[in-house]
Image (cartoon, rainbow, N blue to C red):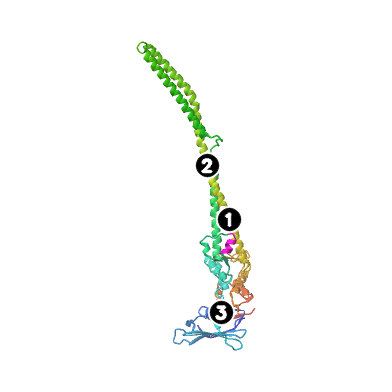
């Protein structure tokens, strides 16, 4: 279904204008010559609403009483939008002369999706992130792709409690989730690398092994031996002193010299005992020092090994989390791929707000002709039964790109009406495929 003729009466700057559009209709003029008013007239029919400012000379004493936009379709159906100073009315008369009972509902099914202007769609790539976001809104309109929480978790991605609040995820939210899991995996892998480095450092710092002997027990036994030896020495010294006292008591007055000799002898005995004891205790003390040092070393080895096992357990746990995130990321990728394969235009994919076609970046890897063809394919998904597409700002293309646009428009199967700034008066050119 196509528009056969367009008639404007007292609309905007036009007192009377009649157009017979073709497959592609180019409306060109200098600014202020009514170029955009023609698009506005068509939009007023399909988008509805009351706007008295469209009445010719609105606000002036010479203002017209009403503005009328009439569209005759190729099946002879007449659509008429009348705007007065107080209201607007819509009337639809079928080819057999009968009036359509619900004209607004009838018109709404004929044409829609004018927001997806192929010219704006192609040019959006030159605006950077802002343009990609604008384009993504268009794509979500014509390519509605959503993911349920159940589908996401079935793909192997466990959702947090806060994430489970969303029952349905659009493509933008889905891409943010995928990005989040990438960031989490990077953080976990970094943590694991740090833990593994700690294990290596601790392992290198281990002192020499002290064997299986219990050096702490050995040290305690040596201490006990030394204490027993010292006790014996002390007891022997006490005995000598007691004997000396007895001898001195018997001979002090009569045998002073004998006492002196006895003292000398006693000192010799003491020295001899000390020397014997020293010889017995010195090796024990040396062994004690070794045993104590080895006991401390054994404690250090045991502590370091415990630290290594603790860090190793943390590393294993981080490894498990990283593996789970790997599975989640792959699952999300597979789910996204499966969803996109169900698109009416297979091969179309959105990554981080950018458009890819069969794996190629729309803006940097496709030629202009292909960009235009894809834009019109996408536009065709959002139009109504009439297949009407309204485009503005055709002047934003250079001559080569403009010709690519016209070729793609003619081949799209849509009826395309495009406005373009030029020099001179209003010019309307109908091109039929």
Above or below 209: residue 85: below
Q: Nearer the viewer, residue 292 or 122?
A: 292
Q: Quadrant of the N terminus?
A: bottom right
Classify mark 2: residues with Cα within 10 Å, few (<14), some (14-19) or many (20+). some
Kindly state the secondary structure of the residue where label 1 is placed: helix
Residue 67 in view here: yes
Counting residues from the N terminus, which is met first, the one under dot 1 or under dot 2?
A: 2
Q: Can you give x and y, in whole percent of width and height, for residue 319 in the image?
A: 57, 51
Extent of the magenta region: 149-156
Q: Which residue is mark 3?
A: 108
Q: Nearer the viewer, mark 3 or mark 1?
A: 1
Look at 53% across and 51% down and name the residue there: 191
Q: Which residue is mark 1?
A: 324
**Residue occupying image coordinates x 52% and y 44%:** 307
**Label 2: element kind:** helix
- Seen from this angle, which residue lies furthest left? 253
Spatial CA distance of label 3 from label 1 is 49 Å
Residue 38: name its quadrant: bottom right
The residue that label 2 is drawn on is: 304
Q: Residue furthest bottom?
A: 97
**Magenta highlight on residue 401:** no
- The earlier-in-sequence mark between 2 and 3 is 3
For the point 50% across and 26% down, the residue is 283
Question: Chief secondary structure of the magenta span?
Answer: helix
Alpha carbons under labels 1 and 2: distance apart: 30 Å
């Amino acid at each position: 279904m196509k528009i056969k003729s367009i008639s404007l009466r007292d609309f905007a700057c036009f007192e009377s204008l009649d157009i017979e559009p073709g497959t592609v209709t180019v409306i060109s003029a200098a600014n202020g010559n009514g170029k955009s008013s023609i698009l506005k007239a068509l939009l007023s029919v399909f988008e509805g609403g009351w706007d008295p400012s469209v009445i010719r000379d609105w606000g002036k004493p010479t203002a017209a009483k009403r503005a009328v936009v009439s569209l005759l379709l190729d099946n002879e159906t007449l659509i008429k939008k009348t705007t007065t100073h107080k209201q607007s009315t819509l009337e639809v008369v079928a080819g057999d002369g009968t009036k359509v009972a619900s004209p607004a509902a009838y018109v709404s099914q004929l044409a829609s999706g004018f927001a997806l202007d192929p010219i704006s769609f192609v040019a959006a790539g030159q605006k950077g992130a802002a343009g990609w976001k604008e384009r993504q809104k268009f794509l979500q309109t014509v390519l509605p792709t959503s993911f349920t929480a159940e589908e996401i978790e079935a793909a192997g991605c466990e959702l947090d409690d806060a994430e489970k609040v969303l029952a349905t995820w659009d493509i933008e939210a889905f891409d943010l989730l995928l990005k989040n899991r990438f960031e989490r995996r990077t953080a976990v892998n970094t943590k694991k690398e740090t833990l593994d480095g700690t294990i290596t450092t601790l392992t290198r710092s281990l002192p020499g092994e002290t064997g299986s002997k219990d050096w702490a027990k050995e040290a305690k036994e040596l201490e006990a031996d030394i204490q027993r030896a010292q006790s014996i020495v002390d007891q022997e010294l006490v005995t000598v002193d007691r004997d000396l006292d007895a001898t001195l008591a018997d001979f002090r007055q009569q045998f002073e010299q004998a006492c002196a000799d006895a003292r000398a002898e006693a000192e010799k005995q003491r020295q001899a005992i000390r020397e014997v004891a020293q010889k017995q205790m010195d090796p024990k003390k040396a062994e004690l020092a070794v045993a104590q040092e080895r006991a401390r070393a054994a404690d250090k080895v045991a502590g370091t090994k415990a630290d290594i096992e603790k860090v190793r357990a943390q590393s294993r746990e981080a490894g498990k989390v990283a593996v789970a995130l790997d599975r989640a990321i792959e699952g999300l990728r597979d789910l996204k791929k499966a969803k996109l394969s169900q698109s009416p235009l297979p091969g179309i994919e959105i990554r981080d707000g950018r458009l890819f076609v069969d794996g190629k970046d729309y803006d940097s890897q496709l030629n202009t002709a292909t960009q235009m063809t894809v834009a019109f394919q996408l536009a065709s998904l959002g139009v109504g039964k009439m297949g009407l597409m309204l485009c503005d700002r055709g002047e934003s293309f250079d001559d080569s790109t403009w010709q690519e646009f016209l070729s793609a428009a003619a081949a799209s199967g849509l009826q395309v009406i495009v406005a373009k700034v030029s020099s001179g008066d209003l010019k309307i050119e109908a091109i039929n495929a």
